[in-house]
Structure formats: structure tokens, C-alpha cells
Amino acid sequence: MRILVMGGTWFLGKQIVQQSLARGWDVTTFNRGRSGADVPGVRTVRGDRTVSADLSRLAASGPWDAVVDTSSSEMAPRDVLLAVRALQKSAGRWVHVSTVSVYEGWPHQPITEASPVLDCPPDADETFGHTGPGGSPTVYGFQKAGAERAVEQGFGDRCVFLRPGVILGPEEYVGRLPWWLARTANGGRVLAPAPADRHIQPVDVRDVAAFAVDQAAATTSGAYNVTHPEGITFQDFLDACFTVTRGAGRPVWAAPEVLAEHEVNQWTELPLWRTHKGVWAVDPTRAVEHGLRCRPLLETIADTWAWLQADGRPVDHPRWAEHGVDPDKEAKILAALA
């Protein structure tokens, strides 16, 4: 099996490369060499996927049985379309890492793969789309929907769309789980978003990678929601964080209206917290039926802490700084709850 990974040097892309090599596959990666070291054992082609000449040079180094694209999250649909057109004769199929943000109803409504997707043309530039007054839909969602259209235009029934929600695990660069781990390690009274029994369904990066690699070798097509089929309650999530970090503390649960009164931003200041009823109601049944296997999230939490304790350093990314409530702000809210 010959596979091309667009990206391949950090987090999900790195895991896909490592798992493909472990299966004995011939792996090529295409990236600019700026975001991380190449995994030993790959063939590397350096280049910029928005530059036609670089893509032509890449295509000449094929063919491949499959492309797995992990590097288009910040790209306009027209840039994805450029790569698709350059590689459609050099690759048997295209596995595209997308997002649940492509759905019209997310995060307000429960989601299946049959849910309507935002409308964005495959050749749209980075200005297409809008962000709704309640934060949904988003420009990001429109852009990712257009990227899916671009892949479908070039590969038809030879493409697969993986639509994860939140991906956690060792080498996470966004900083959601690392923030909670650091906060519980510090101990004391920890501000937590009620209700404690709210289920969340993030998924481990290693499990997403395994499913992506499986799909590269499969013959099926279409979209898969890649979310944890069982999930975990926020109570169990924080209890696990306290346990693995040996933090001497406890969560203090604050109702959504209290957090809103103190202008706590959902999704960032208290990572993974969002009150919309559909945010953690994304049905992964189709993916599970086609082989998605998710480890217990307790294992994800423990392994991420072990990575951090071993001086784990993620790729520098601006989103890391977005996550976590300011200690003074947290202390003020906790004092009000006393």
C-alpha cells in the first residue's frame, strides 16, 4: 500500500504516518517542513500546497493508492481544489479530515451524517461564509464544507470525509486537555461547568488516526462522524484529571447562568464546555459500523499527562493561548460561589 499524507509531522498527521508505517506501508509526506520533524521512514516531498508548481512536482512522485489530507484546516476551498486537481490522476482515493462544523445544525441540534451540510462552492476563497449571531454557523464551517465539495468534485465516489468534533491526546496542540490537567495539578477549588453529569464525546487522536488509515485501505465512500460513542461525564473527566495529576483539590460546579453572569466564554475559558444541546450529540454509528474503535477517555487523559510529564512539547500554535480562564477571574467567581 502506497499512501500520501498531506502534512504528516504533528498530532493527527504524525499519528497517521506512524500507524501507516507500522503496517508496512510505503508513506510519502508533503509539507513545508515548518511545523515539526519528519517521521523516520517516510519519503518527504517539500512544497507548498497552494503553489501549482510544487503540486505538479508532488504528483510526479506518485502514484499512490490513497491520499490522507490532514493539513487543510486553515485553507480556502479553492486551495483544496488546486491540490485535488493536481493529484486526482495520481491517487486512487482521498481521505479528507473535515469537521462537524460543516453541519447546518451543529451545535444546536443532534447530528447524523444525513443532517444538512452548509452550502459553499468548491472554488470559494477565504472570504466566503459568515458567522451567525449566536456563533453558529461559522466561516470556518462554510470553508470546510466547501473543501469537502472540492474533494468530491475531483474524486467522486473515491473520497471519504472524516468529521470529528474535538480530538484529544498526546501531542495535542490546541491545549484543551493540557489546560485542565495543569489546572487540576495545581489543586484547590477548581471552577467547573455544571451539570456534572453532562456527557462529552471527544475522541483520542490515535483512534482517529487508526480509522483514517483503515479508510485509506477501504473501498467505501461518504462521510463519517468520528466522535466517541460512549463519551464521559464532565464529573468523571475532572475526577480523572485530579487522579492522574495527583492534584489536591475538588471541582466547584457553577450553573450556566452563573458562568454567563461572569462572562465566562464557552469552549475556550472552560475548555470543552458548551451549552448548546447538539454539541455533544453527534452520532458516530456509521463510523463504528465501519471499524471505528475508541479507547476509554480515561486512558487518553492518563497518556496525555504522561506525555506532558515527559517534557512533551506540542507544536507552537496560537490556539493554545486561547484556552483557560484567567486565575484572577476564576478566583473571583469561586469567591462568589462560596
Image (cartoon, helix red, strand yellow):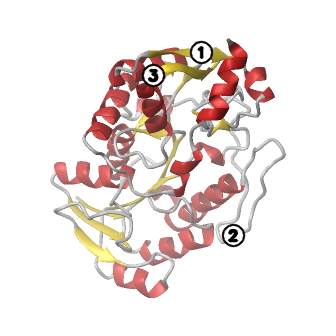
On the image, the x and y values in percent for residue 93 come to 40, 60
User: Between disc 1 and disc 3, whose residue precedes?
Assistant: 3
Q: Quadrant of the N terminus?
A: bottom left
Q: Quadrant of residue 133?
A: top right
Q: Which residue is mark 3?
A: 187
Classed neighbour count for the residue bearing mark 1: other residues with Cα under 10 Å, few (<14), some (14–19), many (≥20): some
Query: Residue at (44%, 71%) from the top-left corner?
Result: 88
Residue ID for mark 1: 252
> Does label 1 or label 2 sit earlier along the sequence?
2
Q: Are marks 2 and 3 in contact (CB under 8 Å)?
A: no
Image point (32%, 42%), residue name: 210
Instruction: Tell me the SS state at disc 3.
Output: loop
> On the image, which quarter does residue 294 sit in?
top left
Q: Which residue is mark 2?
A: 124
Residue drawn at 17 percent across, 62 percent down:
40
Q: Is residue 283 above or below residue 221?
A: above
Q: Which quadrant would the C terminus be assigned to in this image? A: top right
Single out the mark in the foreground, 1 or 2: 1
User: Given the image, on which type of amino acid does mark 1 rest?
Assistant: Val
Q: Does any portion of residue 294 appear in the rendered image?
A: no
> Residue 176: x and y, percent?
50, 39
Residue 231 position (above or below residue 96): above
Q: What residue type is disc 2 on?
A: Ala
Could you tell me which secondary element the residue under label 2 belongs to? Answer: loop
Q: Is residue 235 visible?
A: yes
Q: Position of residue 289 (x, y in %)?
A: 42, 30
Q: Would you call the spot at circle 2 few (<14 residues within 10 Å), some (14-19), or many (20 or more)?
A: many
Determine the secondary structure under disc 1: strand
In this rendering, would 158 be left or right of 338? left
- Residue 271 percent across, percent down from the top left: 57, 35
Residue at 64 percent across and 55 percent down: it is: 145
